Image (cartoon, rainbow, N blue to C red):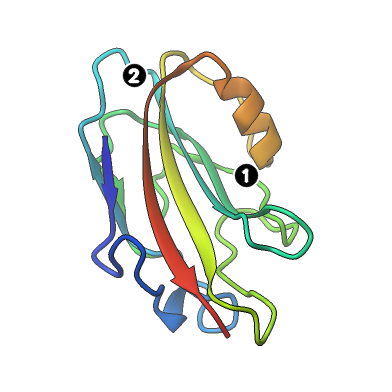
Amino acid sequence: MELRSVAFGDQDLIPERYSYEGGNVSPPLEWSGVPGGTAELALLCEDPDAPGGTFTHWVLTGISPGTGGLAEGLPPADASPGRNGFGDFGWGGPRPPVGDPPHHYLFRLYAADRPLGLAAGADAGAVHTALDDHVLSEATLVGRFER
């Protein structure tokens, strides 16, 4: 699979508009190459550079395999938003500590061979556990952000 955004390229800076303090709007994403046999897509965005360990910025499960992307600020109606590291549902934009070098934000799209069966509010840990041994394909897009 391939995952991309018209808002920023792989390894490029994420525009301020998508940051927690700059609008907190989820970025538009597009993907292709979803394999046959996919029952569900799941999307995570995590920051492995966070001072306290990996910080979750986005959890979205239940995405239909026929969906080809997400519009800016609008997850698909059939998707279930999970809880991010801020304790909110849906997108929580980048907000690294002031003065840190750029953090890396890993947007990962997973194609699962079965429905994950997760309810709205699931966290990244629950998604990773549900995906164990059920990932048909994975695509990653990395954005960077600093304050």
Q: Is residue 50 left or right of residue 101?
A: right
Q: Measure the alpha-carbon separation of dots 2 and 1.
A: 20 Å
Q: Are marks 2 and 1 in contact (CB under 8 Å)?
A: no
Note whether 85 is above or below 126 in the view shown.
below
Tell me the number on the disc at residue 21.
none
Q: Earlier in the sequence, mark 2 or mark 1?
A: 2
Kindly identify the residue that appears in the image at 28 percent across and 60 percent down: 5
**Mark 1 residue element:** loop
Kindly identify the residue that appears in the image at 69 percent across and 58 percent down: 88
- Callout 2: few (<14), some (14-19), or many (20+) C-alpha neighbours within 10 Å? many
Kindly identify the residue that appears in the image at 25 percent across and 30 percent down: 66
Camera-near label (2 vs 1) is 2
Depth check: give the residue in front, 76 or 14.
Answer: 14
Note whether 111 is above or below 14 in the view shown.
above
Q: Position of residue 121 (x, y in %)?
A: 68, 42
Please state which amino acid type lies under the numbered disc 1: Gly
**Mark 2 residue element:** loop
- The total number of labels drawn is 2
What is the quadrant of residue 118 in the picture? top right
- Callout 1: few (<14), some (14-19), or many (20+) C-alpha neighbours within 10 Å? many
Q: Position of residue 127 (x, y in %)?
A: 61, 31
Depth check: give the residue in front, 71 or 29.
Answer: 29
Depth check: give the residue in front, 8 or 88.
Answer: 8
Q: Is residue 29 left or right of residue 22?
A: left
Please state which amino acid type lies under the numbered disc 2: Thr
Tell me the number on the disc at residue 82.
1
Task: Let me know if residue 84 appears in the view.
Answer: yes
Tell me the number on the disc at residue 38.
2
Q: Is residue 122 left or right of residue 12?
A: right
Kindly identify the residue that appears in the image at 71 percent across and 56 percent down: 85
Task: Let me know if residue 117 appears in the view.
Answer: no
Q: Position of residue 80 (x, y in %)?
A: 54, 39
